[in-house]
Image (spheres, grey):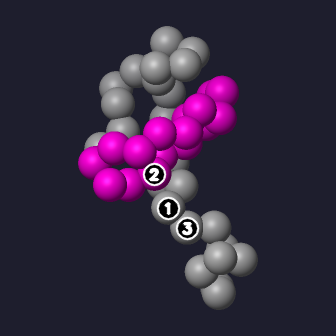
Amino acid sequence: MNRWRCLECGYALEAELPPEECPACRKKCQFVDNNCYIPDCGQ
């Protein structure tokens, strides 16, 4: 499972692929990969 975060409202979810519509704000938002934060990855 991948972690995704909505750029519009910040809603986070786990799914293989991001949804077409955000379950929280009900808009067609862009989702970003939220699997790894830079400090956690050591980059």
Task: Using the image, determine if residue 41 lies above or below residue 29.
Answer: below
Q: Residues within 10 Å of mark 3 (few under 14, many from 20)?
A: few
Gap in angstroms between the C-alphas marked 1 and 2: 5 Å
Give the image location of residue 38, x and y in percent: 66, 74
Q: How many marks?
A: 3
Q: Is 30 left or right of 7, judged from the image as shown?
A: left
Image coordinates for residue 42, horizontal then vertical, percent: 65, 87
Q: Which of marks 1 and 2 is nearer the N terminus?
A: 2
The residue drawn where x is 53% and y is 55% is 34
Farthest left residue in view: 16
**Quadrant location, the N terminus:** bottom left
Q: Give the range drawn in magenta.
A: 1-16
Quadrant for the C terminus, please: bottom right
**Which residue is label 3 attached to?**
36
Secondary structure beneath label 2: strand
Tell me which label, 3 or 2, sits earlier in the chain. Answer: 2
Question: Image point 47% across, 23% down: which residue?
Answer: 22
Q: Is residue 30 magenta?
A: no
- Could you tell me the amino acid type at mark 2? Arg
Residue 7: image tag? none
- The image position of residue 11, as x and y in percent, is 59, 32
**Mark 1 burial class by Cα count in 10 Å: few <14, some 14-19, many 20+:** some
Disc 2 crowd, CA 10 A, few/some/many (<14, 14-19, 20+): some
Residue at screen point 55% across, 39% down: 12
Residue under label 2: 3
Residue type, mark 3 in image: Cys
Q: Name the residue under label 1.
A: 35
Q: Are marks 3 and 1 in contact (CB under 8 Å)?
A: yes
- Report the front residue among 9 and 28: 9
Mark 1–mark 2 CB contact (< 8 Å): yes
